[in-house]
Image (tube, rainbow, N blue to C red):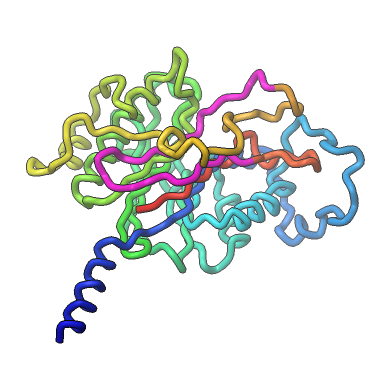
Amino acid sequence: MFLARLFSFLILITAFTAVTSLRLTTWNLRYDSQSDNLTITDSIASLPDRLKEPEPYYTDASHERPWSTRRISVAALLEFQGSSIISFQEALVRQVRDLKELLGDTWDWVGVGRDDGIERGEFSPIFFDKSIVQLKSWDTFWLTNTPFDVSKYPGAGSYRICTVARLFAGGKTLTLLNTHFDDQSDAQRRLAASLILYRAKYEAATTKAPVFVNGDFNSPAEGTDNGAYRIFTGELSPVPINATFAEKFAVPADSPLPENFMMIDTRGATPRQKVFGHFATYTGFSKPGSTSSYGRIDFIFGASHVNWQSVTYKADEALYDDGVYLSDHRPVTVDLVL
C-alpha cells in the first residue's frame, strides 16, 4: 500500500514538473517580387549538380533572385532546423501555398492577406507542425486606430497586421503573435507595439500561459527610431489605442499580472554562451562584406511574469556560397522551455 501511494505521488510530482521544449523560428521571406509561372517541379529540376563546385563561389551574390529560385532552399533550411512553429512575414499567397506543399502534410498554417483580410497582399502566417502542436484558436487584427477593420495607418507605407494563434503543445498552452511593422512610419510602429503589448498582456492573464511575439519590426533596439522596441520592453509608455479594442481585451480585474508587464527580448534572455550565429537579421541583397545596410530588426519576445526560458538563440544564414540570397532577412530561431 505504501509503495502504491509513493508511486502515485511520484507520478503526480512528475506531471507538475514536466516541461515542454519547442523550437520557434521567425523569418521575413522577402515577397515574391519577380513572380513567374514556374512550378515547384520546375524549381527542383533546375537545381545545380549537388557534387559540382560553385565557379566562382558567391557568384552574383548581390541581387535578389525570384521566389522560384529561392523556395526549395528556404524549405530545406527550415526542415533541417527542425522548428515546430514558424512565423513568416512578407509571404504572398503563392509563397504560403508553396511552403505548405514543401514542408509536407504534417504542417498547417493560419493567416490572411493584409490588404483584404482574405488573400490579397502580404501574409504574416503562422505555420505549425500538427504532429507536435495543436491549434486552439486564431485571429488577425490590423495595426491601426480601427484594428478590427481592414485598414491602413495614415502615413504608413502599407497595410500592417498581427496574426494571433493560441496553441497547445506537450500539455502546455501558449499564445504566439506574429507581425510586421511599417517601414516608413515610426508613429505606426509605436501604435502597433502598443496594441500588441496590450493584447499580449490579455493573453497572458486569461490563459495563464506563456505568450510570445515575433516578427519584423522594421526598426532596431537602439537609435532614434526604436520607439516600438522601447514600448515593448517597458522603457517607454504605450500610446493610446482604440477604445473598442481596449474593452475587448481588457485584463480581468483579478489578474495577478502587475502594471509593469512587458516583453523580454529572447536574445538577451538566453545564456550568453548559447547565443550564436549572426547579430544582424537584415542584410539586404548586399555583396558579402558590405555591411552598411545591416541591422537587427527581427525579434522574438517572451512575456514577462510568465514561466518560460530561452535556452538557445541563433540568427542563421540567408546566403550560402552558391551566391543565392534566400531572403534579404536572416531567419531567427530560439529553443524554448515552457
User: Hey, which quadrant is residue 190 in on the image?
Assistant: top left
User: Hey, which quadrant is residue 161 in on the image?
Assistant: top left
Does residue 227 belong to the magenta stretch? no
In the image, 264 versus 98, the foreground residue is: 264
Range shown magenta: 291-316
| Residue name at image x 28 percent, y 40 percent | 200
**In the picture shown, does residue 8 fall above or below 162?**
below
Quarter of the figure that contains the N terminus: bottom left
Residue 30 relative to residue 217: left or right: right
Q: Is residue 26 visible?
A: yes
Residue 233 relative to residue 84: left or right: left
**In the picture shown, does residue 154 fall above or below 244?**
above
The single residue placed furthest to the top in the displayed view is 224
In the image, 248 versus 166, the foreground residue is: 166
Q: Is residue 122 visible?
A: no
| Residue name at image x 49 percent, y 35 percent | 272
Q: Position of residue 23 (x, y in %)?
A: 48, 53
Residue 315 relative to residue 162: left or right: right
| Residue name at image x 23 percent, y 66 percent | 13
Residue 101 relative to residue 336: left or right: right
**In the picture shown, does residue 95 fall above or below 227?**
below
